[in-house]
Image (tube, rainbow, N blue to C red):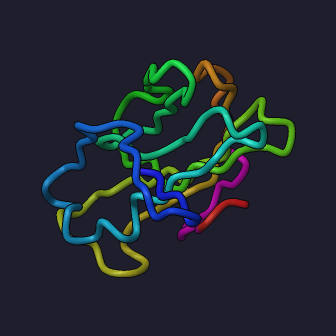
Amino acid sequence: MVSNVNDLSEKIIISGISLPEKHRKDLIYYLVPSWSPDGEKIAFVDGNQIAIVNLLSGEKQILTHGKGLKIYPRWSPNGKRLLMMKVAIKKKNPSYGESRSDIDVMNLDGSFAKALTNLRGEAYLPQ
């Protein structure tokens, strides 16, 4: 949903976004949408994956696939790539330090996913 700060009107951009039940209590941590530099798209978390929605057409595209949780999408300055945090969860309810996360970069079609970090611990909040 987007809110207009001038007249306080609201517009639903996309609905039906899912999030695994085991992560719903942490919604504030996972659902961090990111506007594209040109203002035409928003990247967001849908389920365990990263998706984008085109604001002009309303078309949603899921970019990532596979296991693990992909969160915190962030656009490159030129709008051609996305950074994301990819989390490998090995335990049902891991404590801090019991999971592994890295920062990956990918093209907008989901191709060329490349790990930018390779840590034993956790990498947070790509920018």
x and y percentages locating residue 19 in the rendered image: 24, 49
Residue at 35% x, 40% y: name it: 46
Residue at 46% x, 64% y: name it: 8
Magenta segment includes 121: yes
Which image quadrant is residue 126 in?
bottom right
Vertical position of residue 98 compared to residue 59: above or below: below
Vertical position of residue 31 compared to residue 80: above or below: below
Q: Which region is colored magenta?
A: 115-124
Residue situated in front as seen by the camera: 127 or 9:
9
Quarter of the image where the C terminus is located: bottom right
x and y percentages locating residue 89 in the rendered image: 32, 57
Viewed as shown, does residue 106 lie left or right of 94?
A: right
Residue situated in front as seen by the camera: 11 or 51:
11
x and y percentages locating residue 7 in the rendered image: 51, 62
Residue at 86% x, 37% y: name it: 78
Residue situated in front as seen by the camera: 25 or 11:
11
